[in-house]
Amino acid sequence: MLRIGIDGGGTTTRAVVIDENLEVLGRGEAPSSNHYSVGVKRAMRNIQRAAASALRGAHVPAESVVGWGFGLAGACTQEEQTMLRGQLKEHLKPLILDKPIAVDEDAAAAQAGAFAGKAGAVCIAGTGSNCFGINDKGERARADGLGPLLGDRGSGYWIGEEALRTACRAHDGTGPTTSLLKAVLTALQVASVDQLVQVVYQPNFEKDRIAALFPVVVQCAEAGDDVAHSILYAAGRQLAATSKSVLDTLCIMRIAVSGGVLTRNTAVRVAFEEALRLTVSHVQIQEPLYDATVGAALLTRAGVKPVSLHDTSSLTASVQGASRPATPSALT
């Protein structure tokens, strides 16, 4: 039996065709399918493009697929999922035909892939950040994923924003001296903090440019800048606090990590694991078994129900109190 999984993110839409052994037979890719950023019609076109490419790669007709799973950005609520389900059935009818479809948020697809459809949580830290989990009862919980204004703590954007603020404090003399000042100005191609202010407050300034400062912070930290290192360490602790919330809510111990901030940087990963192990007894941290596209395909056979989400402020405080090596703080 063949299934199709669609991981529709804010940047890229990826599709796979898998068999009953979870082997990938074909892959497809297209631009963003976040309906909030590109509109519903364009999102549907991009999903169709990725799915058709995956079917061609697998050399199978759409009729051979028994189920379609969609893990989509902008599909967190029941209302969003119902709307998108209707749009998918309308716009992708020649492909989907009358086959069953499952529509869920992109984090649910990442979780399903991480544990091959079993219980567990996944902490995702890329440009944004969130943690999503499901327990053995099929109950689910999510923390953060609130966007850069309200959350995304420990994400690439959060790290970039801290780098900007730290650089400005170093310039003003209200914070410690740091190589981040010169590095940030160079990365954004400005000669002074005055020019920096003009650039970042322009209406067309892309927020992705702030998240793109993450590797700049990493470079400074690896060169021995304690202030840059403290930002990365704080990011790890923030992500641990977010994860603790979900693990506690669902009474589960297994968590996988995903996204470049956690998988491509040792400092953030070490801080994350240290803080989480100090605050969650017997936690098991692992790499995902499969990616979110395979996870999306597995959504077609999953049954989950929501539970109430809750405030993580007290949990954040408890994790941030964990011990760490003494370094100058860039966050005070």
Image (cartoon, rainbow, N blue to C red):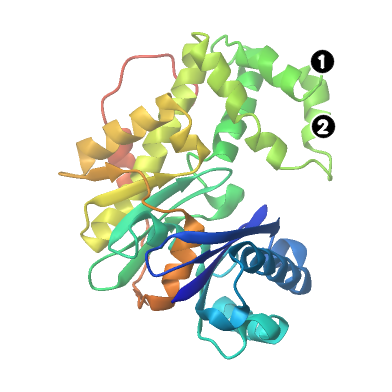
| Residue beneath disc 2 | 199
Residue 197 in view: yes
Q: Which mark is residue 19?
A: none
Q: Residue at x 33, y 57 (%)?
A: 115
Farthest residue, direction front: 59
Q: Which quarter shows the N terminus?
A: bottom left
Q: How much space separates mark 2 and mark 1, taking CA atoms?
A: 11 Å
Residue 243 as seen in the image, left or right of residue 109: left
Residue 94 at x, y percent in the picture? 70, 84
Neighbours of disc 2 within 10 Å: few (<14), some (14-19), many (20+): some
Query: In the rendered image of this protein, does residue 23 appear above or below residue 93?
Result: above
- Residue 102 in view here: no
Judging depth in this view, the residue of 282 and 314 nearest the camera is 282
Residue 275 in the image, given as x and y percentages of width and height: 29, 34
Give the amino acid type for the residue marked by disc 2 in the picture. Answer: Val
Residue that appears at 37% across and 35% down: 237
Query: Can you say whether 202 is above or below 56 in the image?
Result: above
Spot occupied by residue 134 in the image (x, y as percentages of width and height)? 32, 65
Q: Which residue, given by chain and number where applicable, does mark 1 sit on? A: 191
Residue 140: give x, y in percent of width and height: 34, 68
Q: Secondary structure at mark 1?
A: loop
Amino acid identity at mark 1: Ala
Relative placement, left or right, of 22 versus 227 is left
Query: In the rendered view, would you say 100 is above or below 252?
Result: below
Could you say which is closer to the camera, residue 91 or residue 153?
91
Q: SS of the residue at dot 2?
A: helix
Q: Are marks 2 and 1 in contact (CB under 8 Å)?
A: no
Look at the picture and state if 265 lies above or below 156.
above
- Most distant residue in the left direction: 282
- The residue that appears at 29% across and 58% down in the rendered structure is 120
